[in-house]
Amino acid sequence: MNAIAAQQVPPLFRGWVVRIGSYSWRIVPRVLFVAVAISAALAALSFATLMYGTLDLSLGEVWRALHGEGAPAAVRSVQNRRLPRLITAIGVGGSLGVAGAVFQTLSRNVLGSPDIIGFTTGAATAAVVQIVFFGGGVLQTAGAAVLGGMLTALLVYALARKDGVSGGLRLVLVGIGVGAMLSAVMSFLVVRADIDDATVVQQWTAGSLTGRGWPHAVSVAIAVGVLVPALVVVSRRVTMMEMGDDAASSLGISVERYRFAGILLAVALTGAATAATGPIAFVALAAPQIARRLARRSGVLVATSFLLGAVLLAGADLIAQAVEVGLRTPVGLVTSLLGGAYLIWLLARQA
């Protein structure tokens, strides 16, 4: 009966298939509608971010400033401060959303996000080592964060591997343990650092978009442009691994090869995002799950997870700018508060 009903579904509602060479993707109307709706929300948040600040601007003034017209103060504020901050927020939030979708699919666990299983902590620890011992340049910090995230991923992957197989709950538990140890190392480095370096590290580890300029925006944009398309290519096979390793292997999927490739690409994306803003909690946990609920689809929803992650971080940054307690509130504090509430709800729902 179900097979007959499925055959009677009009082609429009089953979606369209896009083929590029040997790769193909199915575009489902509901997923497309959700992506368009999230894009509209992101556009609204983007203009609100560009309008709000110490110098409030109208929508028309923002539009003129984007084209280099209008008052010089407005042009400088929009083009030199607010726009790169916004691009950084979109890139970092989107990167974390995609990385979270990959890790949750590979681990087949809703808690399998990079900030929970230690990869973000590994990237942050390496960045702290760079700042404390070698200086905190943007490119150097980004490189250290990516390298630290990858080394952490290799360690977790090796420790979680048993009888030639890794993944599942074992990957999550090993990652949590490694992350706890790296967090202790990072705290030790902060305690032993001189006051100036400790202050920089403390501000950075809070997770903030304050003061982010074009170097940060460009570095994140490059990472997104290189790594997200690569994840799109492997996402279909990674999604098939949700059925289990045996089922995926029976379909001709090289499970360990694609798991390793997915982990490395997602970790590199996480490292680049962490280097730009510091560790941002819970975006990678919440964005892919909300995306799946809205789209009513499983697997790695790259575009939807990216857009929703960008919306979450851009929205959190707008809240952080509106809530000032003496100094600018770090966006990481806002995401931690909102994400903690989401995690409590998630665990209560799973219980």
Image (spheres, rainbow, N blue to C red):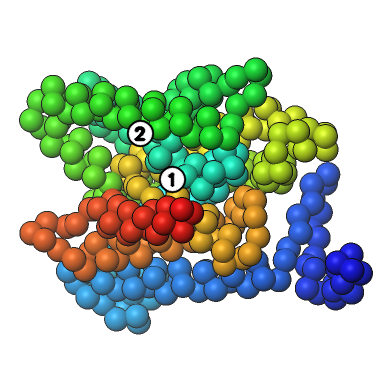
C-alpha distance separating marks 2 and 1: 18 Å
Whether residue 266 is visible, yes or no, is yes
Residue at the spot x=25%, y=40% of the render? 205
- At label 1, counting other C-alpha atoms closer than 10 Å, the crowd grade (few under 14, some 14-19, many 20 or more) is many
Residue 202 locus on image (x, y percent): 18, 38
Pointer 2: what residue?
121
Residue 59 locus on image (x, y percent): 34, 80
Q: Residue furthest front?
A: 351
Quadrant position of residue 115:
top left
Q: Nearer the viewer, residue 284 or 5?
A: 5
Pointer 1: what residue?
220
Quadrant position of residue 133:
top left
Residue at the spot x=45%, y=40% of the render? 114
Q: Quadrant of the N terminus?
A: bottom right
The reply to whether discs 2 and 1 touch (Cβ–Cβ < 8 Å) is no
- At label 2, counting other C-alpha atoms closer than 10 Å, the crowd grade (few under 14, some 14-19, many 20 or more) is many
What residue type is disc 1 on? Val
What residue type is disc 2 on? Thr
Residue at the spot x=83%, y=34% of the render? 250
Please state which of the two labelled residues, at mark 2 or mark 1, is closer to the viewer.
2
